Structure formats: structure tokens, C-alpha cells
Image (cartoon, rainbow, N blue to C red):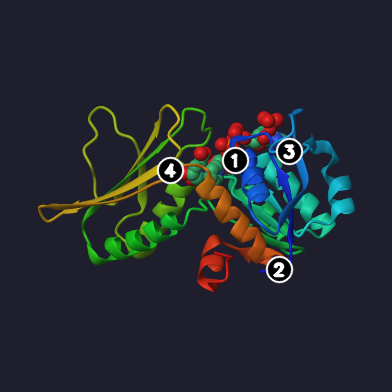
């Protein structure tokens, strides 16, 4: 926790999440949006002027915000992480869909500044992930299938959260190590599979459902995000927690474990 008013920069300010982060910051006492940028020209968001993203270096140097909050795309998130490293600004990123090499670049930035990356800033998802780890470990031999549902404009599939949950399952179940993305035709389930199903429809904010089945019983664990505000609030909590930390690689679990996330 920074201990004083928190100043933030927001990238992707014209996007669904960028707008939500700015609105949540404006509504939150003790938080000021000092910098907001977008790749394409965008009208002010919640009264905050949005600048050209090409000016980010210059704007960060002038404003020296406590943290930058990024919800954009993998390519831009890497470029913004490099800008943060150059300017000495901690970075919170909720962007998903990174390739391994892009993750390496983010990690390289975390050698200069604190970088906190989370595939989902909802507290309920953190609880879901704990519950999934416990259930998958407690039910050896049970089949596991994951279904995620998102709005029809989402680019990456499966979702970043789904990938995190799959990592969780694999971390406690040595017998499950093969991710099967959908099935078609003559495709009976085989040992070692975790089925993964990505649905894209309408304006669904985000839902993740894990099905465990075996021994003539089923267990379903589901999280549904009610609105994007839940992610924006979590990202601001993360920014507050990250400000002033040492360089390094952090996750949302660090914020929640610390119990001082300003909630
Ligand atoms: N961790 C979490 O809790 C959550 C994560 N997300 C993730 O956040 C990301 C953004 O989601 P969402 O807000 O719905 O997406 P949007 O498409 O609504 O917004 C994306 C924003 O990123 C900008 N952007 C995209 N690509 C580039 C690029 N190459 N260079 C510069 N700017 C770029 C867009 O700029 P422009 O307007 O110019 O196109 C836009 O402002 C996704 O990866 C999503 O999965 C989403 C919700 C919660
Ligand atoms: O793109 C989205 O909308 C979301 N993306 C994140 C993900 O990929 O897991 C988190 C949330 O589910 C919404």
C-alpha cells in the first residue's frame, strides 16, 4: 500500500476495461488518474482527457505516477512494460493472451520495476481457483472439463483465466496433462485429457465453470462476473498494493494474501 493518495496511469483508456478502470478510479477516494492514453483518438472518459499512446514515455516522465494499469493487448502491454521500466513506474497488467516470448519480455521489465500480472482481478475467481485445486486433488481419477463464456468481442481463447485454472488443475493432478480444445467427430474422451470449451456470445462479462465427474457423481464450480467493475476494483487494489514495492514479478494472490488491499 502506498500510504498516500494513489496516482495512476491508464493505458487502453478507450477500451472496455480501460474505461472501467478510469471510472472506478474517479469514484474512489484518494485515487487520481494522472495519465490516460489510447492508441486511437478517444473522447474524455469520466472527465479524464485521453492522450495519444505514442506520448506515453513523455507523459510518464512528467507525471511520475505511482503505478500504471494496463488492459490492452499482448503486443502493446509488452511495449508499455518497457515504457514503465524506462520511467521507473510499477505496472499492473490484466491483459491476457501473451505468447511465451511476450511473457519473457514482461518478466525482463520486472527486473527494473515491480510488475503485477493477473489473468483475473475478481476476488471470487481467486476463491474459485483455490476451490478447484482442492477439489481436483481430493477427487483423483475424476474427469475434469472446463467451460468459459465471454462476450462476442473477446479476442483470445481460451481466456487467460481458463489457462490459469488449467495450470491449477495440472499442478495437483499428475494424471491430467493434455488439454483438448473442443471435440468433434469420433473423439471419445481419453485418459489424461482436460476438456476445454470456449463460448463467445452476446455481452457476457465472463464466466468460468469447472466440472469434475467420476464415481457416479458430478461437482460443478462456477464463477460469473456481474460486471467489469469487479475487475477494475481489483486492479486498483493491486495498483495500490504495488506502488512503492521492489522490482519483481507479482500476482493478484500477493495482494490478497497481504490482506492490506484497501478493502
Ligand atoms: N485480468 C482481468 O481481470 C481482465 C482482463 N481482461 C483483458 O484485458 C484486455 C482488454 O480487454 P477489453 O478492455 O475488453 O478489450 P477492448 O478491445 O475493449 O480494449 C482494448 C484496448 O487496448 C488497446 N489496444 C489493443 N491492441 C493494441 C495495440 N496493439 N496497441 C495499442 N493499443 C492497443 C485498444 O486500443 P484502440 O481503442 O486503439 O483499439 C483498446 O483501448 C484483454 O486481454 C482481456 O482479456 C479483461 C477483463 C478483465
Ligand atoms: O476479455 C475479457 O472480457 C476477460 N478476460 C479475462 C480472461 O481472459 O480471463 C478475464 C475475464 O474473464 C474477462
Within 8 Å of ligand 1, the CB of disc 1?
Answer: yes
Per the model, the C-alpha gap separating discs 3 and 1 is 16 Å
Quarter of the image containing the N terminus?
Answer: bottom right
Nearest the viewer among 139 and 127 is 127
User: What residue is pinned by disc 3?
Assistant: 47
Q: Does residue 257 appear left or right of residue 70 in this picture? A: left
**Mark 4 or mark 3: which comes first in sequence?**
3
Residue 234 at what x, y percent from top left? 55, 55
Instruction: Using a 10 Å C-alpha cutoff, classify the residue at mark 2 as few (fewer than 14 neighbours), some (14 to 19) or many (20 or more).
Output: some
- Find out if the beta carbon at label 4 lies less than 8 Å from the nearest ligand 2 atom: no
CB atoms of marks 4 and 3 within 8 Å? no
Q: Which mark is residue 17?
A: 1
234 or 251: nearer the viewer: 234
Spatial CA distance of label 3 from label 2 is: 25 Å
Front disc: 3 or 2: 3
* In this rendering, position of residue 111 left or right of residue 230: right
- x then y, percent, for residue 23: 64, 43
- The residue that appears at 61% across and 48% down in the rendered structure is 24
Query: What residue is pinned by disc 4?
Result: 226
Indicate which disc residue 2 carries: 2
Q: Earlier in the sequence, mark 4 or mark 1?
A: 1
* Residue mark closest to the camera, 3 vs 1: 3
Secondary structure state at the residue bearing disc 2: loop
Amino acid at each position: 500500500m502506498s500510504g498516500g493518495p494513489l496516482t495512476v496511469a491508464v493505458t487502453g483508456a478507450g477500451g472496455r476495461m480501460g474505461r472501467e478502470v478510469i471510472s472506478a478510479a474517479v469514484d474512489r477516494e484518494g485515487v487520481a488518474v494522472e495519465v490516460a492514453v489510447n492508441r486511437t483518438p478517444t473522447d474524455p472518459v469520466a472527465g479524464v482527457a485521453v492522450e495519444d499512446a505514442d506520448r506515453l514515455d513523455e507523459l510518464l516522465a512528467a507525471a511520475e505516477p505511482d503505478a500504471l494499469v494496463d488492459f490492452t493487448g499482448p503486443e502493446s502491454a509488452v511495449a508499455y512494460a518497457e515504457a514503465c521500466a524506462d520511467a521507473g513506474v510499477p505496472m499492473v497488467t490484466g491483459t491476457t493472451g501473451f505468447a511465451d516470448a511476450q511473457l519473457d519480455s514482461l518478466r525482463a521489465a520486472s527486473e527494473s520495476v515491480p510488475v503485477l500480472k493477473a489473468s483475473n482481478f475478481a476476488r471470487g475467481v481467486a476463491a474459485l481457483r483455490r476451490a478447484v485445486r482442492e477439489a481436483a486433488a481430493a477427487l483423483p481419477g475424476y474427469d475434469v472439463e472446463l467451460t468459459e463464456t465471454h462476450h462476442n468481442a473477446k479476442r483470445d481463447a481460451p481466456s487467460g483465466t481458463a489457462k490459469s485454472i488449467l495450470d491449477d488443475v495440472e499442478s495437483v493432478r499428475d494424471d491430467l496433462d493434455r488439454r483438448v480444445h473442443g471435440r468433434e467427430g469420433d473423439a471419445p474422451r481419453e485418459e489424461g485429457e482436460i476438456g476445454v470449451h470456449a463460448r463467445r456470445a452476446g455481452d457476457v462479462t465472463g464466466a468460468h465453470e469447472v466440472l469434475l465427474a467420476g464415481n457416479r457423481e458430478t461437482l460443478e464450480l462456477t464463477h460469473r462476473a456481474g460486471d467489469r467493475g469487479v475487475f477494475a476494483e481489483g486492479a486498483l487494489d493491486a495498483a495500490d498494493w504495488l506502488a512503492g514495492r521492489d522490482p519483481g514479478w507479482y500476482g493478484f494472490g500477493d495482494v490478497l494474501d497481504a490482506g492490506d488491499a484497501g478493502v
